[in-house]
Amino acid sequence: MNTIAHIFFGYIACVLVFGEQISNEHFLAIALFSILIDLDHIPGLIKYFKTSKSKRKYLPENILANWFRSGFQEPIGILFIIITLGLLWILGITNILIPIGILCVFTHWLVDLLTVHNQPLAPFSHVVFAWKFKTKKQRLISELVITAIVFIIFLIIYYY
């Protein structure tokens, strides 16, 4: 899923859980936590752009998923991040940023699970899973529709 949709979805989830005032005060943190785990895309982007355009056109989804999704994007990595943040909370760091981070990381994973090719058993298995998206065009259309819907909901919540 794209960065904008992750930020808007994270913000909406935070408004629903923490309220509008806290979410507005911590919008930058919500944005950062919502996209932080996508930093693992950087090596895949480098590999992707080093590949010739003619070869990129025919790369299968499982290769792209391996390039762009590390274990941090899958349940094992998400659990590791959430448990680490939860332990910080248990150890006495009761800053509101901890539960915001947990919620935003979880919503990032949830949106990706529902919209992109992923590897739910990584790093133990690289079997690729996807919801009914047979072509890149179908996935692109779904991303555009979801982004538009989430953006409209964001605007409604933020401005009303």
Image: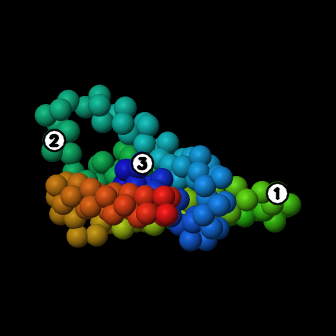
Task: Give the residue pinned by disc 3.
Answer: 3
Horizontal and vertical percent position of residue 61 = 25, 53
The disc, 3 or 1, on the residue closer to the chain's N-terminal end is 3
Give the residue drawn at x 27%, y 56%: 144
The answer to whether residue 156 is visible is: yes
Q: Is residue 113 left or right of residue 158?
A: left
Front in this rendered view, residue 87 or 10:
10
Disc 1 element:
loop
Give the residue drawn at x 36%, y 54%: 1
Disc 2 element:
loop
Task: Give the residue pinned by disc 2.
Answer: 57
Give the residue drawn at x 31%, y 58%: 148
Horizontal and vertical percent position of residue 109 = 48, 62
> What's under tag 2, amino acid-wise?
Lys
> What's under tag 3, amino acid-wise?
Thr
Quarter residue 57 falls in: top left
Mark 1, Cα crowd under 10 Å, few <14 / some 14-19 / many 20+, is few
Front in this rendered view, residue 135 or 10:
10
For the residues labelled 2 and 3, the Cα–Cα distance comes to: 23 Å
Task: Give the residue pinned by disc 1.
Answer: 93
The dot on residue 110 is none
Comparing labels 2 and 3, the label whose residue is closer to the camera:
3
The answer to whether residue 73 is visible is: no
